[in-house]
Structure formats: structure tokens, C-alpha cells
Amino acid sequence: MSFILQPWHILLAALCGMVNQRQQRIIEFQNAQIETLLKKLGKKRLLLDDNQRRLLAVKAHAIGRKALLELTTIVTPDTILRWHRKLVAKKFDSSNKRQPGRPRIRQEIVDAIVRFAREVKNY
């Protein structure tokens, strides 16, 4: 079975190449913009709220660590992925279902203990 190159194959390949080149230029611009902002910020620490961390963590996890190492980020890739691990751990820790203290004793057990104490006292 031989593959015959059709004219639309060439057109599609050229279109994909143009889209890829445009995306690469956008990524390079974003990296340059981030580098400029980081230089302007200097040694100051960037403070992010939980929602900003959550957004970065989810987006970074979708990209992956190797790709993050190639990009310019405002915090290290390890930090971003640590945020994601904490986010996932918090989601599945079931802390919202827990109640403080030990569980209550059933009323029938309490009644049995009180009855036993009265019987022992009267004995």
C-alpha cells in the first residue's frame, strides 16, 4: 500500500507549521515579559493568594515538570508542583467530615451504665 501525497496534505502541513510558529512566538514573548517583571521586582518576594497558587498549580501540572523547566516562571517548577500536591492532598483528606473530639456514646449504653451504678450502690 503506497501513500500518495495529496495537495491538501501539503496545505495542511504548511498551516500547522504557521500555527506552531505563531504559538512559539507568543511563548517567547510571554517569557520575555515575565523575565522583565522579575528583574523589576528584584529580590522582593512575590506574594500570591491561595486562588492564584491554585490556578498556577493546576495549569503547571497539565504542562508537566520538563516543560516547566524550559519556561520562565515566577516561582520554581518544584514550588508550583508542590502546591499541586498539597492541593490534591487537601481535596482528599476528608477533614470537612471530621468532628472535634471522640464520638458520642450511644444513649442505651449510657442508660445501662447508670442502671448498673444504681444497682451497685443499692447492693
Image (cartoon, rainbow, N blue to C red):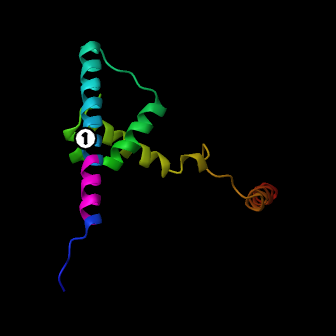
Estimate the x, y position of residue 40 in percent, counting from the top left.
27, 13
Q: Is residue 75 left or right of residue 55?
A: left
Quarter holding residue 77: top left
Which of the image's four quarters has the N terminus? bottom left
Magenta region's main secondary structure? helix
Estimate the x, y position of residue 49 in percent, counting from the top left.
46, 27
- Image: 15 above or below 36: below
Other residues around mark 1 within 10 Å, as few (<14) / some (14–19) / many (≥20)? few
Q: Amino acid at mark 1?
A: Gln
Name the residue located 27 percent from the left edge and 30 percent from the top edge. 29
Estimate the x, y position of residue 67 in percent, counting from the top left.
23, 45
Residue 33 in view, yes or no: yes
Q: Which residue is mark 1?
A: 24
Q: Specify start and end residues of the magenta stretch as a single range.
A: 9-18
Name the residue located 30 percent from the left edge and 30 percent from the top edge. 30
Which of the image's four quarters has the C terminus? bottom right
Judge whether residue 105 is colored magenta. Answer: no
Front residue of 36 and 4: 4
Quarter holding residue 37: top left
Residue sitting at the far bottom: 1
